[in-house]
Image (cartoon, helix red, strand yellow):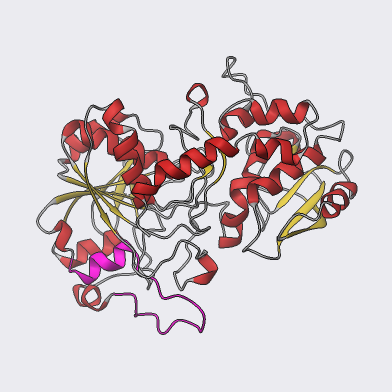
C-alpha cells in the first residue's frame, strides 16, 4: 500500500495543553456573539471519557479543531486517554488539500505515526475492510458540514455508519453547529436520482447538524438497508440555537474544502451550488468568492442578468454586476482562464435570505440567454443531467425549460418539504 506522510495539526500539543483546552481558551466572545461549545470541546472537557481505553478510528479533516484550532487527533494523541487506531480522510483529504472530486491517498501522519486511510468514495465494504485492518472498536466522526445535501461529508458519515452497523462497531459523532442555521428548504431527493451527492432521501438544505443527521439516518435508513441500527452516541454542542448562523457564534472557521473559504460561502452554497449543473456558467471556482461569483463567457452573458434579478426584489439579497476570470473550472474546461460576465451574490439580510429560491430566480433569468446549457455527463447515459442529481429529480430542469417562473418551481416541493420537517422533528437536538 502506497503511504504518504501527513500532518494532522498546525502545532505540537502537549498533555498539559489538552488539560487546559476548552471553549474559553481564545478569550471572551464579542458582545452579541454566542459562546458555543462543540462536541469536541465537550469531549476534551470530559477528559475523553466517552472514548477512554478504546481503539478509535477518526473520520475528520482540517475542520476537526477545538476553539484554539487544535486538531482532535493531536488532542487525543497527547491526552494518553485514547488509543487512535487510524484516521480516515473524506473528499478533499484529511488535510483538505485536494480539489472537488479528489483525495490525498493513504499515508502516515508525521506527528503521531497514525495511518491515514483515503476514504473518499469508499463503499460500505471498503469501510468494513478498513475497520478490520485498523482493528477499530469505535468510529469517531468530526467534520464541519455546511448544510447542503450535495456536500459530500454527510454521505461519508452515512456510509461509514452503515458499515459500522454491519460489523458491530460503535459510532460517536462530535457534533458541530450547522453554519447556515436549522431551517430546512428545497426539494427532496428521489430514489432514482441518488448518487454520491445525495445518497438518501433528504431535502436540499436539510437544516440539521451532523449529529442530528446521524440520528435521522440511524432511525430512518439503516434499519431498512442494514437490518439494524448502529450503536450511536452524539456528543452534543452547548449553547447553540437553531436560528444561529456561523456569524452569530464565536466558533473558529476552518475551510471545509478549498472552495468553501468563509461562512458567507456556506450561506449561498445550497443555492448557487446548483450552477455546477449548468455547463455554460461557472460557479466561481478559482476566484476569491466561489459560489458568490456566478457567470458565463463575457460574449454570452451581460449586465442584464443582474438588472433583471435586482428588479425581482428577492428578500435579503442584491446582485452586483461582475466580471472575473476563473482559474479553476471543475468540469467546465471551456470557461477556464476566460473572462466571464455575471453577478456577485451579495447577502444583505441573512434573516430573510433564501439561498434556494434565490438560485431558482438566477437560473430562470440565466435561461433567457441563448448560450445557457445544462451540463450533461456522458458517463451516465441513463441520468445525464447533473442538475437532476443535485436537485433530486428532473423536475426543476424540466419546469424551467418549459418556462415556469420562480413561485411555480419553488411551490412544487412545498408538500415534500413539509413532510420532511415533520419526519425529522423527533431527531432534532437543539
In the visual, does 3 lie left or right of 16? right
Splitting the image into 4 quarters, where does residue 399 fall? top right
Q: Which residue is drawn at 26% across and 27% down?
A: 226
Q: Is residue 74 above or below residue 204?
A: below
Residue 344 in percent (x, y) is at: 75, 55
* Residue 316 sits inside the magenta stretch: no
Q: In front: 2, or 219?
A: 219
Q: Which residue is drawn at 45% across and 75% down?
A: 34
Q: Main secondary structure of the magenta part?
A: loop
Q: Position of residue 330 (x, y in %)?
A: 63, 38
**Can residue 223 be seen in the rendering of this structure?**
yes
Q: How many marks?
A: 0
The x and y percentages for residue 129 are: 23, 31
Q: Residue at x 48, y 28 (%)?
A: 195
Quarter in which the C terminus is drawn: bottom left
User: On the rendered image, what quadrant is the N terminus found in?
Assistant: top left
Is residue 42 within the magenta segment?
A: yes
**403, above or below 231, in the image:** above
Quadrant of residue 347 in the image? bottom right
Front residue of 199/224: it is 224
Q: Give the left or right position of residue 159, taking residue 307 as reference.
A: left
Q: Nearer the viewer, residue 80 or 37?
A: 37
Image: magenta residue range:
22-47
Residue furthest to the left in view is 53
| Residue 102 appears in the picture as rendered | no
Residue 416 locus on image (x, y percent): 53, 35
Amino acid at each position: 500500500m502506497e503511504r504518504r506522510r501527513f500532518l494532522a495539526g498546525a502545532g505540537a500539543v502537549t498533555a498539559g495543553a489538552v488539560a487546559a483546552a476548552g471553549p474559553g481558551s481564545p478569550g471572551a466572545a464579542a458582545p452579541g456573539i454566542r459562546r458555543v461549545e462543540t462536541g469536541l470541546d465537550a469531549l476534551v472537557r470530559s477528559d475523553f471519557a466517552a472514548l477512554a481505553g478504546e481503539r478509535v478510528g477518526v473520520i475528520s479533516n482540517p475542520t476537526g479543531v477545538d476553539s484554539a484550532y487544535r486538531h482532535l487527533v493531536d488532542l487525543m494523541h497527547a491526552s494518553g486517554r485514547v488509543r487512535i487506531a487510524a484516521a480516515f480522510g473524506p473528499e478533499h483529504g484529511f488535510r483538505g488539500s485536494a480539489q472537488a472530486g479528489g483525495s490525498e491517498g493513504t499515508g502516515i501522519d508525521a506527528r503521531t505515526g497514525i495511518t491515514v486511510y483515503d476514504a473518499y468514495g469508499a463503499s460500505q465494504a471498503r469501510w468494513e475492510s478498513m475497520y478490520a485492518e485498523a482493528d477499530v472498536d469505535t468510529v469517531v466522526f468530526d467534520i464541519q458540514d455546511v448544510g447542503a445535501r450535495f456536500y459530500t461529508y454527510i454521505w461519508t458519515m452515512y456510509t461509514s455508519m452503515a458499515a459500522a452497523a454491519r460489523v458491530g462497531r460503535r459510532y460517536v459523532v462530535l457534533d458541530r453547529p450547522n453554519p447556515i442555521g436549522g431551517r430546512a428548504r428545497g426539494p427532496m431527493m428521489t430514489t432514482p436520482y441518488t448518487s454520491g451527492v445525495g445518497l438518501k432521501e433528504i431535502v436540499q438544505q436539510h437544516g440539521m447538524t451532523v449529529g442530528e443527521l446521524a440520528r435521522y439516518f440511524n432511525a430512518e435508513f439503516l434499519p431498512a438497508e442494514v437490518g439494524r441500527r448502529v450503536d450511536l452516541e452524539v456528543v452534543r454542542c452547548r449553547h447553540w440555537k437553531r436560528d444561529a448562523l456561523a456569524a452569530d457564534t464565536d466558533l473558529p472557521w476552518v475551510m471545509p474544502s478549498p472552495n468553501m473559504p468563509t461562512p458567507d460561502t456556506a450561506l449561498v452554497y445550497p443555492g448557487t451550488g446548483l450552477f455546477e449543473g449548468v455547463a455554460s456558467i461557472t460557479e466561481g471556482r478559482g476566484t476569491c468568492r466561489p459560489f458568490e461569483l456566478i457567470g458565463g463567457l463575457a460574449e454570452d452573458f451581460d449586465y442584464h442578468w443582474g438588472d433583471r434579478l435586482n428588479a425581482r426584489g428577492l428578500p435579503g439579497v442584491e446582485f452586483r454586476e461582475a466580471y472575473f476570470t476563473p482559474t479553476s473550472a471543475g468540469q467546465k474546461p471551456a470557461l477556464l482562464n476566460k473572462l466571464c460576465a455575471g453577478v456577485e451574490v451579495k447577502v444583505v439580510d441573512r434573516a430573510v435570505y433564501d439561498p434556494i429560491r434565490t438560485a431558482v430566480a438566477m437560473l430562470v433569468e440565466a435561461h433567457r440567454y441563448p448560450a445557457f446549457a445544462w451540463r450533461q455527463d456522458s458517463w451516465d447515459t441513463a441520468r445525464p443531467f447533473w442538475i437532476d442529481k443535485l436537485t433530486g429529480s428532473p423536475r426543476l430542469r424540466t419546469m424551467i425549460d418549459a418556462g415556469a417562473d420562480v413561485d411555480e418551481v419553488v411551490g412544487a416541493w412545498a408538500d415534500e418539504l413539509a413532510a420532511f420537517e415533520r419526519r425529522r422533528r423527533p431527531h432534532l437536538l437543539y
